[in-house]
Image: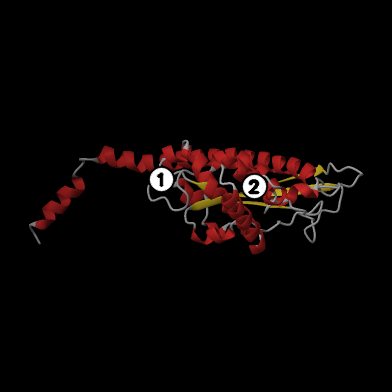
Amino acid sequence: MKGGAPFVRSLFRDQHGVVYLEFLIAFIPVWTFFVCAVQLAFITHANLMVKHSADSAARSAAVVLPDDPNEYGGEPELSVGRNRVTPSDVATVLSRVSSVLRDSPSSSSLVSAFSDTTLANLGRSRLNTIRFAAHIPLMPLAPVSVGRDLRPSMAKAIGNERKLASALYYQPFALAVTFPGVEAGVATGPEITVRVTYAYQCTVPLARRILCHAFDDLDAKGELGEAFFPLAQGFVGGRFRALQHETTLLIHDAPYEYRERGS
């Protein structure tokens, strides 16, 4: 023990590496501030794009809601309920396509079959058309790696062309389009308010842990439950920030009734 005391005293007097240690002590807070500033800049940019998405969805709703029901599988005017695909609808499609393949298996015949009024409008709805108008402006915000990313980086946060591909499977559960004030799925007033809620995935290393939350802890979880594909939300990791905007516009309807197709 006596031989160890001088070693301990010399260890405390040793000045080697002091500058490096001071650099680390000063660097970590500065680096944390920098990455948080970068993440906040990305969130602000995303917030502006969500506002633009709400404007786009509202412009779409203003003309889509009173549009011809024949263009939406017979869905009533001013309806914001989804025109779901039923098993009988799928059977109709399969039957029509199989008959075309059996009688005239050519590409032109198949195109003609799918351009038939019944098939062309299958599953189409006013809601999905409005949602599509909201999706397009937000495609550049899709993350390069969806969900849990074990190796986040600034390059991934900035993004690349893979964003457009990942948007195809990220947007359906990260984006919700709702209509405040609409009851029973039908708009009744002269105006329509469209609310767009988006789960923006934070991807800047370290800052995402400080500024963003797990998907299940988002304040707008109830709104995101109205997303097109909510089942996928339970399998998503990562950190997110809920962004939300509303836009109200007059409905552009006309004082006449649409004729039934074929009359």
Quadrant in the picture for residue 93: bottom right
- The first of marks 1 and 2 along the sequence is 2
Q: Residue at coordinates 62% horizontally, 40% vertically from top-left?
A: 136
- Disc 1 residue type (three-letter): Pro
179 up-or-down from 47: above or below:
below
Nearest the eye: 108 or 38: 108
Specify the farthest residue to the bottom. Answer: 87
Q: Does residue 28 appear in this view?
A: yes
Colouring method of the image = secondary structure
How many discs mark residues in the rendered view?
A: 2
Nearest the eye: 164 or 101: 101
Q: Residue at coordinates 53% horizontally, 49% vertically from top-left?
A: 170
- Disc 2 residue type (three-letter): Ala
Spatial CA span between label 1 and label 2: 47 Å
Q: Position of residue 12 (x, y in %)?
A: 20, 49
Whether pointer 1 and pointer 2 mark residues with C-beta atoms closer than 8 Å, the reply is no
Nearest the eye: 178 or 84: 84
Q: Position of residue 60 (x, y in %)?
A: 74, 42
Quadrant in the picture for residue 62: top right
The 10 Å Cα crowd at callout 2, few under 14, some 14 to 19, many 20 or more, is some
Q: Is residue 256 left or right of residue 149?
A: right
Specify the farthest residue to the left. Answer: 3
Quadrant of the image containing the N terminus: bottom left
The dot on residue 113 is: 2
Specify the farthest residue to the front. Answer: 103
The 10 Å Cα crowd at callout 1, few under 14, some 14 to 19, many 20 or more, is some
Q: Position of residue 180 (x, y in %)?
A: 76, 54
Q: Position of residue 163 (x, y in %)?
A: 50, 40
Residue occupied by mark 1: 152
Q: Does residue 219 appear in this view?
A: no
- SS label for mark 2: helix
Camera-near label (1 vs 2) is 2
